[in-house]
Image (tube, coloured by chain):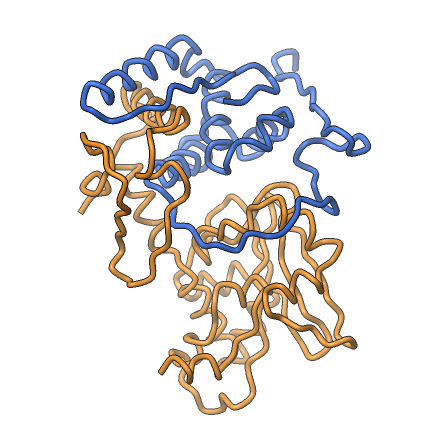
Chain colours: A blue, B orange
Amino acid sequence: MTSSPSRTTLLREGADGRAVHDVGGMDFGPIDRDEHDLALWEKRTDAMLILLCSKKNVFTIDAMRRVIEDYGQQAYDRTTYYEKWIRAIRNLLVEQEIVSPDEVEKRMAELASVHRANGRRVSAETIDWAKGGAA
Amino acid sequence: MTHDDHDHDHDHDHDHDHHHGGDGHTHPPQRDHDAGPMSAYEVLEETIRSLLIDKGVLSADEIAAQIDLMDSRTPALGAKVVAKAWSDPAFKAKLMADTRGALLDMGIDIGTLAEFRTIENTPDVHNVVVCTLCSCYPKLLLGVPPAWYKSLAYRSRVVVDPRAVLAEFGVAVPEGVEVRVHDSTADLRYLVLPMRPPGTEGWSPDKLASLVTRDAMIGTAIPDPGLRAAAE
């Protein structure tokens, strides 16, 4: 099993050795009960995950959990739900050598410039892919 | 209509909200949607999708069909199951013993990613569901989870202070009633079977289903015929 991906879970600060996702019993303030509809890109992210896991067997749902649970605290707490998902899908596709990091960066730049050329504003933020990083 | 027909990648800036669905029940989309510039993660989604389509891993039609399936799974489906359980003792017995099989009998396929279990509220026990580690939810029965279900605030607190959280949701659990919090996993999802409200004797399954809200099947609400009467 030498090809097994390594797992080095980063811990949550001040949480007594807990991993970032292990939040049961902690305090994150009041519950915001506002309802939100999903954006189309979020639905597409959801659809791609289900298809990649259950129809195409590209990776398993457990691999998806592993990648999200291995995020650093900053990436985990600052990203929204579907931001975590699309980030994890990218990381797993890279791990499976279906896409390369360069390919992703290049296509992101191309698409952003097409949108800008069409007058759509695109955030200047970049995604920090380093472990523990977050845009 | 395919989903690309209502893509929001318009070629102009705009800051008004679009609502789709025609069910008269829409909510503000989550941030970054139509409101401001495209976020880096939104560009990442488009990037991954276009690369997967280019490489023949997925097709645009498959993605659109999967979104259609997701959109077809709403709490109305779960409500139909609950109403049937309230109306048909044999179905209820099967639902409690073999949720997957009972749902299949109704033509509902919950897929292969996770197992489902039904937990019944009784005069002695009130059940509420969470996923402390992520956001596991019976999506194939109730549709996408509400934002609060996925929030760190709900995930962290409902396991240690469930009565207070339930009170915030308007559910006052009497002192003598035990509260059980069920922590879902990637492999096991829960459906709460609420108690059938008094005063609903002789109601049709459709009328009963109209009482069963999404939150009632998570455990953060109680079906209330009074609310239904008020809405009529």
Q: Quadrant of residue B99?
A: bottom right
- From the viewer's side, name the closer residue of B117 and B75: B75
- Identify the residue at image location x=45%, y=69%: B79
Please count the marks in the image. Answer: 0
The image quadrant that residue B182 belongs to is: bottom right
Residue A13 or residue B129, whichever sits in front: A13
| Residue B98 seen in this snapshot | no
Q: Is residue A133 above or below residue B130?
A: above
Q: Position of residue B87 (x, y in %)?
A: 49, 81
Does residue B72 appear in this view?
A: yes
Q: Which residue is situated farthest in the top direction here?
A: A102
Left-right relation of B147 to B49:
right
The quarter of the rendered structure image containing the N terminus of chain A is top right
Q: Which residue: 61% across, 66% down?
A: B97
- Image height of A15 relative to A10, above or below: below
- Depicted A26 relative to depicted B39: above or below: below
- Where residue A124 sits in the image (x, y, percent)? 38, 19
Q: Is residue B85 left or right of residue B6?
A: right
Residue drawn at (57%, 73%) of the image: B222
Residue A6: percent from left, percent from top: 65, 16
Q: Residue furthest right?
A: A16
Q: What residue sits 50% from the left and 65% below the top?
A: B102
Where is residue A125? Give x, y as percent.
42, 20
